[in-house]
């Protein structure tokens, strides 16, 4: 029998890529999904097969990280070999508006899942989706597994709490529990409320005549942006090691938000000064100015290497958004050689 994985947050960007990769590796994949009045399964529609068909390897289950009884039931029913805890209220700006809910999904939800595993007696390997946001007000120009956390948002503080809880279950109960500390990772499946996708989607829609302008907040922050499917591969690698440990996953390259903006508008042959407007609503009460990861440990121990770099990432996201806006990227974007 193949291995069995449970993914919370399977309907999100990372969950969809991870599900794809685990199915390709022969796993039976179970996903926790929230009940919603409209479909929330768009990112995994291409993987979905009617459960009445024999041999189906992707199964979806209603539940919620805030409903501990559903977590306990699922762990006991599915008896997974690996659990990937990706579910979260993952938007930093929104976490200032909804701090309690954010903390509930991240700290209480993660604890509920760890405790459900502990109580069940099932001993799956456990991955926790930690974030570079935990570093917050950084004092060092690159961050690795030894860099202290100085969180700047309810989201980041909650992720620090979940990170600590994972260590407690690892030390106290010998659970194979791993914290990934992942720097920003993006893709055409990124929610359009995060800045990279907001920019590429905005540029494509301006090109298509669907929007007159793009409203943004702070353009001065620096982020280390990688390509999401490469990061979900790193999650899997962490759970295949002999011992549980914590790992940073990053490209080691950092760029200002305005560089991403310039790059996307330049590829489309548009002048960003004409279209980009400032809106203070997108500022945060406290900002993280600089993130740049050092993933040496992941390189050495996991054999993991980022391959998609900044310019390629901007292009592939913009191309996908052009298609979504009904445009042919080969016609409307500058060719690769002209933009290299
Ligand atoms: P995402 O696209 O926002 O997906 C979040 C997922 O969590 C969605 O499937 C969402 O369900 C689900 N969810 C939210 N609240 C839930 C709850 N109470 N119970 C059950 N499910 C719930 O996030 P992502 O970019 O894929 O990121 C995956 C994880 O990695 C998150 O924990 C995020 O904080 C963390 N992370 C992300 C990055 C990054 O750059 N992407 C970097 C570091 C860490 P719906 O679809 O129903 O909303
Ligand atoms: O795209 P962002 O919202 O991503 P942020 O805050 O870095 O968080 C993402 O990455 C984290 C990993 O470090 C994850 F843990 C987290 O779940 C999430 O996936 O914002 C990036 C930067 C910020 O400095 C923000 O202030 O872009 C700036 N920004 C400027 N204008 C904007 C906007 N961000 C958003 N979302 N929307 C804007 O209009």
Image (tube, helix red, strand yellow):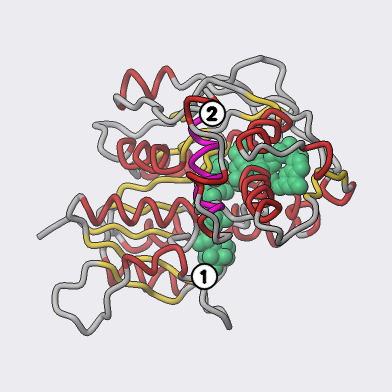
> Quick check: which quadrant has ligand 1?
bottom right
Residue in the picture at 81% in, 45% down: 275
In the image, is 125 to the left or to the right of 183?
Answer: left
Residue interval drawn in magenta: 311-322
Q: Nearer the viewer, residue 196 or 154?
A: 196
Judged from the image, the secondary structure of the residue bearing numbered disc 2 is helix
User: In this view of the protein, can residue 202 be seen by the observer?
Assistant: yes
Count every numbered label the image shows and give the total. Answer: 2
Magenta run includes residue 314: yes
Vertical arrangement, residue 217 with respect to residue 193, above or below: above
Residue 336 percent coordinates (x, y): 48, 30
Q: Nearer the viewer, residue 38 or 35?
A: 38
Q: Main secondary structure of the magenta part?
A: helix
User: In this view of the protein, can residue 160 be seen by the observer?
Assistant: no
Q: Nearer the viewer, residue 7 or 315?
A: 315
- Whether label 1 lies within 8 Å of ligand 1 gets the answer yes
Vertical arrangement, residue 154 with respect to residue 89, above or below: above
Q: Are marks 1 and 2 in contact (CB under 8 Å)?
A: no
- Local crowd size for mark 1, using a 10 Å CA cut-off: few (<14), some (14–19), many (≥20): some
Give the label, 1 or 2, closer to the camera.
2
Magenta run includes residue 9: no
In the displayed image of the protein, which residue is found farthest to the left?
1
Residue 113 percent coordinates (x, y): 46, 59
Residue 281 percent coordinates (x, y): 87, 51
- Whether label 2 lies within 8 Å of ligand 2 gets the answer no
Q: What's the distance in space between the residues labelled 1 and 2, CA to CA? A: 35 Å
Vertical arrangement, residue 269 with respect to residue 201, above or below: above
In the displayed image of the protein, which residue is found farthest to the front?
331
Q: Which residue is mark 2?
A: 310
Q: Which residue is mark 1?
A: 64
Of callouts 1 and 2, which one flags the residue occurring earlier in the amino acid sequence? 1
């Amino acid at each position: 029998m193949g291995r069995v994985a449970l993914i919370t947050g399977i309907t999100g960007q990372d969950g969809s890529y991870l599900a794809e990769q685990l199915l390709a590796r022969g796993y039976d994949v179970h996903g926790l999904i929230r009940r919603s009045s409209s479909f929330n399964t768009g990112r995994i529609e291409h993987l979905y097969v009617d459960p009445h068909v024999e041999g189906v390897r992707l199964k979806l289950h209603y539940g919620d990280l805030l409903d501990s009884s559903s977590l306990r039931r699922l762990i006991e029913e599915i008896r997974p070999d690996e659990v990937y805890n990706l579910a979260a209220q993952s938007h930093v700006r929104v976490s200032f508006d909804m701090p309690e809910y954010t903390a509930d999904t991240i700290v209480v939800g993660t604890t509920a899942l760890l405790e459900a595993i502990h109580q069940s007696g099932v001993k799956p390997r456990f991955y926790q989706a930690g974030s570079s946001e935990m570093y917050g007000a950084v004092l060092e120009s690159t961050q690795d597994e030894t860099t202290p956390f100085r969180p700047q948002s309810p989201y980041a503080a909650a992720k620090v709490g979940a990170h600590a809880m994972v260590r407690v279950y690892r030390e106290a109960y010998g659970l194979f529990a791993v914290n990934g500390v992942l720097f920003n990772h993006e893709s055409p499946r990124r929610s359009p409320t995060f800045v990279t996708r907001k920019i590429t989607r905005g540029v494509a829609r301006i090109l298509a005549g669907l929007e007159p302008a793009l409203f943004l907040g702070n353009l001065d922050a620096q982020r280390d942006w990688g390509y999401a499917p490469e990061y979900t591969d790193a999650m899997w690698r962490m759970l295949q090691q002999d011992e549980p440990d914590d790992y940073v996953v990053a490209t080691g390259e950092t760029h200002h938000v305005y560089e991403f903006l310039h790059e996307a508008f330049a590829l489309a042959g548009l002048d960003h000064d004409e279209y980009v407007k400032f809106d203070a609503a997108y500022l945060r009460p406290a900002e993280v100015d600089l993130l740049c990861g050092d993933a040496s440990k992941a390189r050495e121990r996991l054999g993991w290497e980022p391959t998609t770099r900044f310019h390629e990432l901007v292009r592939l996201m913009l191309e996908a958004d052009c298609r979504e806006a009904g445009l042919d990227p080969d016609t409307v974007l500058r060719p690769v050689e002209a933009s290299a």
